[in-house]
Amino acid sequence: MVRYSKLPFRELVRRYNCDIVYTPMILANVFSASQYSRECEFSTNLLDDPIVIQFAASNGTDLANAAELAAPYVSAIDINCGCPQKWAIQEKIGSHLMSDPETVRDMIRQTKARVDVPCSIKIRIHRDLRETVEFVKRALSVGVDFITVHGRTRRQKSTEPVNLEGMKLVKEVSTVPVLANGDVFSVKDADDIVAVTGVDGTMSARGILENPALFAGYDVTPWECIEDYVDIALSYGTNAFIFHHHLMSMFEYTMSNAERRTFNSLTSVPSILDHLEEHYGLNIAEKRARRPLRPLVQPFSIQTL
C-alpha cells in the first residue's frame, strides 16, 4: 500500500493477529540513490518482525542495489508486479511487469545473488491464465521463495470479483508457498478463499485499511483499535496526512455522511484529536492508564545503523 503501511500501522495490525506485514511500495532506484528517500520511506525497530520490504523496479540492477541496502534489517524482499496505477505502468514498474516475465526473472536472479533473505513476487493474473502459469514457472526457475497473487488482471476494477480459479491455478503449479490477495474483508473471506484455492495464506490491503482488526475477527474497526492507532501514531510521530487518512478509512462505515464531511475537512493532528475527544470521548492519558501499549522500541532508519 503506497504510503499507508508504515511502522505505526504495522505495529497496530500486529496487535490484531497479522502474522506478516509489508512496507509500502518503495521505488528501488530512488531508495538506493537517496539518503533522504531511505529516511522517509523506511523505518523499523526491533519489534517490527517479520517485515517484508516491497520494492518497485524496472530492472534487476536497481532492485538488487536497493535490496542489498535493506536486507540486513528485513525478513524478505518483495517485488511489486501488481500496482495497476497509470504512472507505474508508464514507468515500466508494477503491473507492467506482468507482460515482461524475463525482466522479473532477472530481478529475482540478481537479488538472490546479492542478499541472503527470501525474495518474493506479488503478481496479478492474466486474462489468459496460460500466461500466468508461464510467468510463475519462470519465477520458480530462478528460485523465487514465495508468491502473492492478486486475483484480478491489471485492467480489472476492484469492484469486480477476484478470479478464484486463477489463484488456485497459481497454487497448483507452484512449489513454494502462495498467498492470495483481493477481496479479503473478513476472516470468513480469508477462510473461504483458502478453502477454494488451497493457498497457504491470505493478504489484505483495502480491507485492513478499513478494519485493522480484521484478522482478529472483527467485522468493523472496534473503538479500542482506533484508540490504539491514535496512541501508537502519536508516540511515533505520524504526519497529519497519513494520520488523517488512516482514521478516515477506519471510520468509513461508522460515521454518518454529515460527520464524515466534517471529519474529512480536518487538516491538522490537533483538530483531529479535538474531534475525537468531542464526539467519541477520546482520552489518551486515560486509555494509557487503562490499557497501556507494550513498550515502544525506538525506530531507526538505515542511515543511523
Image (tube, rainbow, N blue to C red):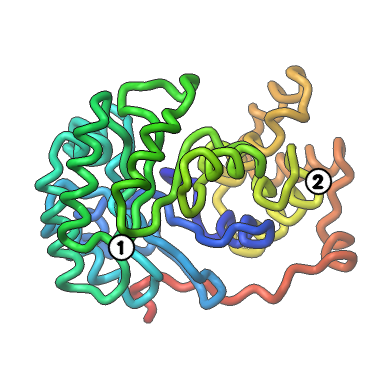
**Residue position marked by numbered label 2 in the rendering:** 223
**Residue position marked by numbered label 1 in the rendering:** 145
Image coordinates for residue 206, horizontal then vertical, percent: 54, 37
Amino acid type of the residue that numbered disc 1 sits on in the rendered structure:
Asp
Question: Is residue 88 depicted above or below 64 in this figure?
Answer: above
Q: Can residue 92 be seen in this view?
A: yes
Residue pictured at 12% horizontal, 51% vertical: 59
- Residue 189 image-quadrant placement: top right
Label 2: how many Cα within 10 Å (few below 14, some 14–19, many 20+):
few
Q: Quadrant of the N terminus?
A: top left
Image coordinates for residue 202, horizontal then vertical, percent: 51, 48
Residue pictured at 28% horizontal, 52% vertical: 79
- Residue 296 image-quadrant placement: bottom right
Q: Are marks 1 and 2 in contact (CB under 8 Å)?
A: no
Image coordinates for residue 263, horizontal then vertical, percent: 70, 30
Kindly state the secondary structure of the residue where label 2 is placed. helix
Residue pictured at 73% horizontal, 47% vertical: 217
- Residue 302 image-quadrant placement: bottom left
